[in-house]
Image (tube, rainbow, N blue to C red):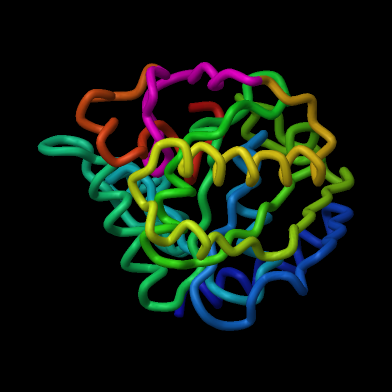
């Protein structure tokens, strides 16, 4: 209930203070599971994206944000799932939480780059999105966030008002043809690269064929770990998740 109340309040406010333009929203299925795979250039990506989608969008975030009174309310209100990093593989728990959302017919948001882009370019994607698509059969919509970096650069708490914000959705991509190759590394890479290709076309970002370097401490989980400075990368390698993946608080 809080999610919808907050959304009802924030949507008109943000549309007043920012020039939000949405393209391709009709591609998001009206029902059934779907993965929204977005580029990630600003903390505000995680606010604007859920507000323009009529369905509830779920992310996962580290449990510490639910224990801090300054951030707990917004994380709960925005439908985040808390994931504790200690004990076992956080990425496995994130993957399990994501599967639960999708198997219940929900919408799951993920940032394949694994962290916010440090310079506005689009970086190589981790294969968590591919694993989820194959394990649940959910289609994937690429989502390009445009202008959010300029409206709220990394490290800035207060955004610049009245900036243009663009949100573009790709047609839903189905990967059912790979359903019998869930653990094939080449298939996981192919699906991920197809998703990043769509993101590149939608966002017009310069593409970098290497993983983005992380900035600051670990901030959430749900993309592939792969050698990019995440906690317990060895443990996360088995699931293809790790890093920041779905929600990155500004300036952290």
Say whether residue 6 is magenta: no
Q: For the point 63% across and 47% down, which residue is it? A: 38
- Residue 124 at what x, y percent from top left? 59, 28
Q: For the point 20% across and 30% down, which residue is it? A: 235
Q: For the point 45% across and 67% down, which residue is it? A: 137
State the quadrant of the N terminus: bottom left
Q: Residue furthest left?
A: 87
Q: Quadrant of residue 149?
A: top right
Say whether residue 224 is magenta: yes
Q: Height in image: 59 above or below 52?
A: above
Q: For the point 83% across and 50% down, which residue is it? A: 166
- Residue 117 at what x, y percent from top left? 63, 26
Q: Quadrant of residue 9?
A: bottom right
Task: Identify the main secondary structure in magenta.
Answer: loop
Decide which of 62, 130 is in the foreground and name it.
Answer: 130
Magenta region: 209-228
Decide which of 6, 78 is in the foreground and name it.
Answer: 78
């Amino acid at each position: 209930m809080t999610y919808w109340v907050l959304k009802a309040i924030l949507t008109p406010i943000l549309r007043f203070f920012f020039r939000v333009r949405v393209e391709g929203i009709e591609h998001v299925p009206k029902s059934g599971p779907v993965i929204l795979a977005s580029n990630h250039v600003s903390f505000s990506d995680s606010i604007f994206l859920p507000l323009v989608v009529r369905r509830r969008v779920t992310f996962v975030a580290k449990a510490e944000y639910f224990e801090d009174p300054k951030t707990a309310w917004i994380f709960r209100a925005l439908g985040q799932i808390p994931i504790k990093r200690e004990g076992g593989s956080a990425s496995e728990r994130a993957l399990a939480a994501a599967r639960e959302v999708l198997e219940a017919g929900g919408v799951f948001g993920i940032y394949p780059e694994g962290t916010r882009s440090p310079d506005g370019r689009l970086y190589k994607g981790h294969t968590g999105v591919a694993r989820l698509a194959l394990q649940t059969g959910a289609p994937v919509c690429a989502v390009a966030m445009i202008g959010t970096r300029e409206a709220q650069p990394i490290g800035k708490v207060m955004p610049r008002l009245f900036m243009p914000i663009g949100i573009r959705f790709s047609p839903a991509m189905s990967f059912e043809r790979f359903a019998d190759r869930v653990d094939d590394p080449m298939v996981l890479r192919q699906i991920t690269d197809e998703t990043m290709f769509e993101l590149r076309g939608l966002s017009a970002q310069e593409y970098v064929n290497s993983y983005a370097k992380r900035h600051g401490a670990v901030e959430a989980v749900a993309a592939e770990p792969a050698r990019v400075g995440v906690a317990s990368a060895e443990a996360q390698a088995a699931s293809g998740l790790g890093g920041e993946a779905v929600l990155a608080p500004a300036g952290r």
